[in-house]
Amino acid sequence: MSAIDDLFRKLRGSGRKALMPFVTAGDPDLAFTAAVLREIARRGASLCELGIPYSDPIADGPVIQASYTRALSKKIRLDQILAMVRELKPAFGPPLVSMVSYAIVYRHGLEKYVADAQAAGLAGAIVPDLPVEESGALSRICRAADFSLIQLVTPTTPRPRAIRIAETSTGFLYYVSVTGITGERGELPPELMENVAWIREQTPLPVCIGFGISGPEHVRRLAPVADGLIVGSAVVRRIAAASETGTPRETVLADVGNYVAELLSALTS
């Protein structure tokens, strides 16, 4: 059983839902990324997503794109990110998964990426630009290694294809709440809850919602129909203050931690 399978088994057994913040690796540097991850874990996050910076992301909005640009401007490399994870993970409780472009996985080598990521302490990967039709090779490698391959279903995915994606995913299924790119939204689509309820009937996998979630009101609304909620841009925007406005790092850490605590409170209310 993978670390992610074990996490959701425990959460379901106790009637709880997961909160999964997203953090860009290396923004503004890897030492601060590690500090943010520790703070998020200390506040009680269930799982953390670690974004691997990439120059041409297809699903990320301006906030996360800007964080990737800042990290890449400092020549950050995958081996440096994995080294940070390797140092962090022994004292880090929640499972940690990478959000990574398939171009990076392919260039590194499919088997080598899974082996190196797993050796560093990552429990799985989300590969947003990998179509289900092309995912067979990576899926087989991940299954053999008990390394979760989390795939995405969007509001425009035809239902037969959504079922196929669920069948090839492991760990959990990532349901994209809105059409378009990541980013905070004031309103979420009214049909979202119905769509998530439908996909949960089609798969035994936990279904977690991401994209557009920005505040406690979203968390309270979506928690009843999902196994977990993913928050990215709202976290990355707060971290950006360390480099964009010169806000002291301890202030940024406290802001991120307080925000995660606020969402966790809404998740359990």
Image (cartoon, helix red, strand yellow):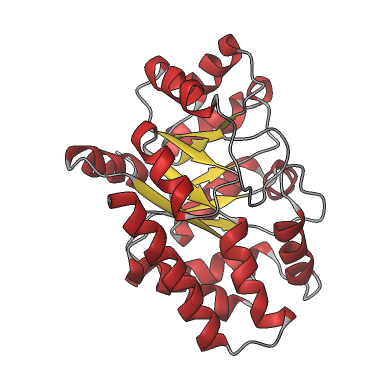
Residue shown at the point (63%, 52%) measured from the top left: 184
Q: Quadrant of residue 46?
A: bottom left
| Residue shown at 62% from the left, 48% from the top | 186
Give the left or right position of residue 181, taking residue 21 as reference: right
153 w.r.t. 80: above or below: above
Q: Position of residue 176 (x, y in %)?
A: 58, 35
Residue farthest along the top direction in this orientation: 160
Please indicate, yes or no, whether residue 88 appears anywhere in the rendered image: no
The residue lying toward the viewer, choosing from 145 and 222, is 222
Residue 23 vertical position relative to residue 199 in the rendered view, above or below: below
Quarter of the figure with the N terminus? top left
136 relative to 265, above or below: above
Residue 238 at x, y percent in the picture: 60, 71
Q: Residue at x 54, y 15 (%)?
A: 164
Residue 47 seen from this side: yes
Q: Nearer the viewer, residue 15 or 10?
A: 15
Provide residue 210's location: percent of width, then percent of height. Answer: 54, 42
User: Residue 124 appears at what percent x and percent y?
Assistant: 48, 46
Looking at the image, how many numbered discs can be counted on the residues? 0
Q: Quadrant of residue 266?
A: bottom left
Which residue is painted at 65% across and 39% down in the image?
Answer: 128
Dividing the picture into quarters, in which one does residue 14 lie? top left
Viewer-side residue, 121 vs 48: 48
Question: Is 44 on the left or on the right of 58, as rendered?
Answer: left
Can you name the residue that lies furthest to the left here?
A: 14
